[in-house]
Image: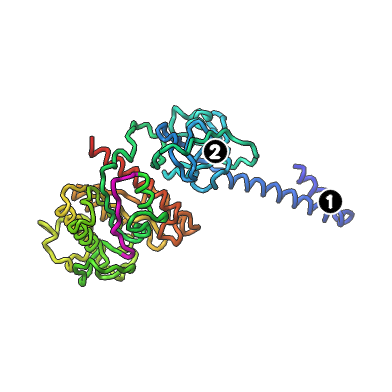
Amino acid sequence: MKIFLVFHSLIRNFAVWLTIKSMRFKCIIVILLLFLTGVCQESAAQQRGKATFYAKRFNGARTASGVRLHNDSLVCAHKTHQFGTLLLVKNPANGKQVVVKVIDRGPYVKGRIIDLSQRAARELGILAQGVAMVEVSVFKSQTKVPYKPVDDTLDLPEIDMEVTTGESDSTPPWQIASDCNIVILGDSNTSIGGDDCSKSVGWNKWFREMLSPASCRSYARSGATWTNTTRTTYNVSENTTEVSENNVIYNQINRLKEAVESGRQMVPNLIMIMAGTNDAWFADKRPNAFSLTGVQAFTRNQGSITRRRISTVLTLAESVRYGCEMLQKSFPKAKIVLLTPLQNTHTSSYKTKMTGDIIETCGKRMNIDVIRLDEGVCIDRDEELEQKHYTFDGVHTNEEGAKCVGAYVTKKIHMMLKNNKQ
């Protein structure tokens, strides 16, 4: 109202106050801009979404920052804020608020924006709820928050930092998988983790560390596809990093079989296959990949598909079926798990989903577990197109992306193994 009166006065006295008008007008504009800038910054800095909190059993577990979680400390996990950032978390339902320090990454469930220590959840009054709407903003004061470090000399294993869901699950991953020999097949998002699953940009490195199996080895190759071609033959020596006639899951299975027969590889009791990205990406090199649906691959092929020559198995669906039948015959006691492709910036979300749907259909037909990685994981195509958060090129995970995918897969595999032992 006052601003309106000033403008009104200036207009009425334009001839007399010409010089003063210019100064007043400038002052008013500056004040308005400063006000609006402050409002916009405050709005942009504040997040609103769901909060969850860590379960008691993760007390002492190593977080993504390297420090250990202590549920009596006021700490949290956030997907983007730097480690050490202080965040003000408000519970709009009761007006309570708390300041927490970022020490971990997550959560990776859609709609959730922060994972809290149990003490922070208690301060906000959300312990009984498990999940609650909160408002999060950066706390700019230098005030220190209560933080109790855990003795790093304790021999505590690395584990998946999952949040409380209300389910009772007290068996840690490393106990479930302590006698498990794991083999992983796939394409470049697995091969970048190294054959020994030790490189930090590969999800399999974090999966191995979190699950702590007896052994974990990768036979994945960059450029590999599920889909075969008319020139695909048995070839266990080729080691290319590009899409080629023989760079297929079929030959990774052959290399695995040869390694087991020669004694260089323990007989696996868990075989995981993460592939399909290149089938969708390089359609010109696999033109028949999507000619059949998952259902058609079974209705049109009665009996065992492995009776056919591999050079006649030219669709994604048939190739998945063929590879899984090979594994079931060669390693009848092994559990097989199929992982669908991650979202990426080089393939449309529709094509990635269609690839995942075919793989999932084949898995269900063969009573094989499937983990969908194109949904529920941190990597989102649209977000990566805008700014690279979890990949370094839109396709391959960086260390943060590898950690988040590794944690997600660990959680899923842990539950599968636990259910199998019950």
> What residue appears at the point 22 percent right and 56 percent down from the top-left corner?
294
Relative image position of residue 67 (x, y in whole percent):
49, 41
Instruction: Give the residue furthest to the right.
Output: 16
* Region rendered in magenta: 211-223
Taking the magenta stretch, the answer to whether it contains residue 220 is: yes
Q: Residue 343, located in which quarter of the rendered image?
A: bottom left
Could you say which disc has been placed on residue 135 in the image?
Answer: 2
- The image position of residue 387, as x and y in percent, is 50, 57
Mark 2: few/some/many CA within 10 Å (<14, 14-19, 20+): some
- The label on residue 365 is none
Q: Residue at x 17, y 66 (%)?
A: 310
Residue 75 vs residue 282, the one in the foreground: 75
On the rendered structure, is 152 left or right of 5? left
Residue under label 1, please give it. 12
Query: Which residue shows up at 41% across the image and 38% down it?
Result: 155
| Residue 349 vertical position relative to residue 415 in the rendered view, above or below | below
Residue 9 picture location, percent across and down: 83, 48
Residue 315 vs residue 170, the one in the foreground? 170
Does the segment drawn in magenta span residue 376? no
Q: Measure the C-alpha gap from mark 1 to mark 2.
A: 47 Å
Type of amino acid at the residue the image marks with label 1: Arg
